[in-house]
Amino acid sequence: MHIGIPKETRDGETRVAATPETVKKYLGGKHTVVVERGAGDAARYPDDAYEAAGATLGSTQDALGAELVLKVRAPSPTELPQMKSGAVVIGMLDPFDAQGIEQMAAAGLTGFALEAAPRITRAQSLDVLSSQANLAGYKAVLLAAHHYGRLIPMMMTAAGTLKAARAVVLGTGVAGLQAIATAKRLGAVVEASDVRPAAREQVESLGAKFIDVPFETDEEREIAEGKGGYARAMPPGWMARQAALVSERCKQADIVITTALIPGRPAPTLVSADTVAAMRPGSVLVDLAVERGGNCPLSEKGQIVEKHGVTIIGLTNLPGLVATDASALYARNVMDFLKLIINADGALAIQRDDEIVAACLVCEGGNVARRT
Ligand code: NAD
């Protein structure tokens, strides 16, 4: 197939959907590859590295006009008209953005949104949510450490002892667990909360303390178990008990990292404005859920702000701050997904009965794919 790698155009997007490493593998698999000039610049993959891997360099139009287009973000309204009807596009296409998917369908594209892949063992190597959330969790702690005006580890020096920083991590999926591990490595004392009962063991295995919000009814427990590993919205009673406990823990904390998400819904509020007002001056909150409304109402999307003496970091694309590694992992995720829609001869052969393929397909033949 003829594969196009355009330069990402969304504001602040530094990642690229293919690296020289994956391009080389595509070329060994009976494909041709055109990379838009400068596509990898922001991720530190220069044009000559793609050329050395065997790709052709081209214009925006050349890359977007390919029969298979590999993207990080969904095509924008300016990119869509440059794509060919019938082409296949793969990326983080935001499967819950109904309008965006309709526009791709109207452009005649076959779209695969990799975020929609099921959380099953076979899908791990193409799981973009995991590969990117892991980096976001790591970077969130480093950002917090940078903005926190004090040290993280306990230090015993001849001039006296400094206490270890206290970190609270709310939401312990992929990003939260990496945040715990990173904060522990830096020497923080860490506590964490999640709705899913299974999270306790994972939190404790990393050496952090689990903030226990007991279930008062069977219904609460059943909702908390979630579906497919994902959390569901908890009843107001449980949320109120969690808020009270979280508020107490945040008041003692120096660093708070929030990552709580519920698929297809706004992020739950976990740290209220009152809680922020009661936090220690100089403490730092990183809200990784800000793109979905945030876990704290005082977070501002894309901004670093100070409220009540607390630095609140609402940057939206943390993996983009480590674009070289984020692109390397993302590009391998994409390459793994392609194995499900391309046959050994290098031709398009979409395995529609494959549950990963079926889950990721968002539009085809002018229509929006039916979501289950
Ligand atoms: P996510 O990004 O959707 O959400 C982040 C975390 O927020 C989740 O752990 C969720 O339970 C939690 N959360 C939601 N509401 C909350 C609340 N009110 N309070 C506290 N926490 C709350 O999660 P994710 O990182 O995408 O992981 C989702 C699930 O998928 C996890 O169970 C994870 O272990 C699992 N997973 C499985 C695989 C696999 O088997 N292939 C790969 C990756 C992740």
Image: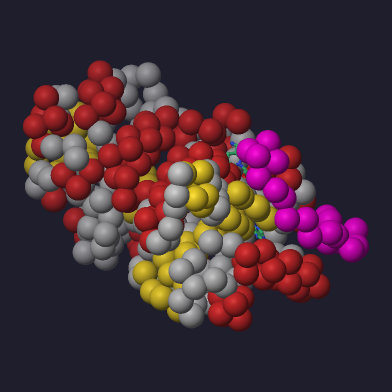
Tell me how the rendering is colored.
secondary structure
Q: Write the residue at 48% across / 31% down.
A: 125
- Quadrant in the picture for residue 220: bottom right
Position above or below: 330 against 110: above
* Side of 122 relative to 74 (left or right): right
Q: Write the residue at 18% across / 37% down.
A: 45
* Side of 158 relative to 324 (left or right): right
> Residue 5 in the image: x percent, y percent?
22, 42
Tell me, yes or no, whether the highlighted magenta stretch contains residue 210. yes
Could you say which is closer to the camera, residue 226 or residue 101?
226
Position above or below: 3 against 248: above
Can residue 121 be seen from the camera position used here? yes
Position above or below: 53 against 257: above
> Residue 258 in the image: x percent, y percent?
55, 60
Q: Write the residue at 53% across / 46% down.
A: 154
Can residue 264 be seen from the camera position used here? no
Quadrant position of the N terminus in the picture:
top left
Q: Write the residue at 65% across / 53% down.
A: 192
> Residue 182 in the image: x percent, y percent?
50, 43
Numbered marks: total: 0
Position above or below: 227 against 53: below
- Quadrant in the picture for residue 87: top left
Tell me, yes or no, whether the highlighted magenta stretch contains residue 314. no
Q: What range of the chain is rendered magenta?
A: 204-223
Residue furthest right as drawn: 217
- Quadrant in the picture for residue 265: bottom right
> Residue 60 in the image: x percent, y percent?
13, 50
* Side of 175 relative to 12 (left or right): right
